[in-house]
Image (spheres, rainbow, N blue to C red):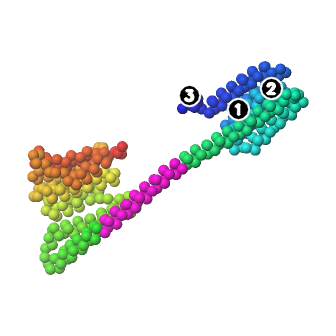
Amino acid sequence: MSYLDRWPPLVKDGLLAVVVAAALSVTVADTPGAGALDLAAVVTGSLVLVAWRRAPLVSLVVSTACMLVYAAHAQPGPPSAFPVLVSVFAAVRAGHRLPAALASVAFLGGSLAVSLPNADLSGRNLQTTTLLVGWFLMAGVGATVTRHRQAYLEQAEQRAAEAERTREEVARRRAGEERLRIARELHDSLTHSISIIKVQAGVAVHLARKRGEEVPAALLAIQEASSDAMRELRATLEVLRDSDGEPAASGLDRLDDLVERARSTGLPATVTISGVRRRLPAEVDNAAYRIVQEALTNVSRHAGGATAAVRVDYAGDELVVQVDDDGQASADAPPVPGVGLLGMRERVTALGGRLRAEPRPEGGFTVRAELPLKETP
């Protein structure tokens, strides 16, 4: 990009008008018989070029009239056509071909008509007119090419924008199709199995009560867990099928049910809540619930006979969730991180928080998540 390209269009047009006016003023001074009227016509016809972009028809009419007055009175030759050439170019570029053609014919015809009575035998006037006709044709052709090039560039930009929009639509459609495929797979593979577990657990509970037997706590836990799994699976399927829907996810409002379900499986668990409870962002609320759920599940699986302590701290600008157990884990033999811990870390990282999952110095394992309550950058 050149230095002039950085200038505003109005500044460049003004500079063009001033340069043309100055050059033709010198021509007026060197033309025998030229007077104040010719100078006024030249200055007016040149300075109007400042509007050749924004008002091409005004520039065309004014410059043609003024320069025709100068050409008819002083007969300066080709220099008088410069402002008219610029205006013809501007008019054709703007799509005003007929006015540009009429102005060209008027200027050329008027100049030729005035010069015929004084024509010499050498045919100089005819040669000048022929030269001017060529100039006007070149101005019209150049303007037409410029107009077509501008239209081509605009069409190319529109095609590029359309292609980008089409790519985005295709990506959204493919994402929607993938969500539907996942929803179908989840429905076909999980819903049926969980439904069978729920039904059979319900039948077993019913038969036990019908016989007057005590229902095992593990059986009740299976029945409740299957019901909760069905509810969350339906919510997940609804989200997958409707990309605009908000997930009906579990949050800390169901923490008591979660801990009670863990106790029903034989895991001693306590809950401590500190700070002022308040409404949490949906993603933070859901992440906190899932972290406690996964941590309690890991204690039940890998720390047999251990007890769990759940602590939720509503701090000023963050939510702290911590689950400790007194199992057999130690710093000398830390457990191998599995998919559950990886999922917890991904949830916390996505929210801009911090996760610490490691053996405790006094024995056992701790999971501590610090979730910011501010908007994630």
Left or right of 84 on screen, residue 353: left
Magenta-drawn segment? 159-188
Q: Quadrant of residue 154?
A: top right
**Residue tagged 1:** 49
Badge 3 density bin: few <14, some 14–19, many ≥20, Cα 10 Å: few
- Structural crowding at the residue carrying mark 2, measured as other residues with C-alpha within 10 Å and reported as few (<14), some (14–19) or many (≥20): some
Residue at image point 29% right, 43% down: 316
- Which amino acid, mark 2? Pro
The answer to whether residue 93 is seen in the rendering is no
The spot of residue 356 in percent (x, y) is 21, 46
Q: Nearer the viewer, residue 87 or 134?
A: 134
- The quarter in which the C terminus is drawn is top left
Residue placed furthest toward the right: 117
Q: Residue furthest bottom?
A: 211
Q: CA distance from mark 1 to mark 2?
A: 20 Å
Residue at 34%, 60% (x, y): give it.
248
Q: Which residue is mark 2?
A: 76
Mark nearer the N terminus (2 vs 3): 3
Q: Quadrant of the N terminus?
A: top right
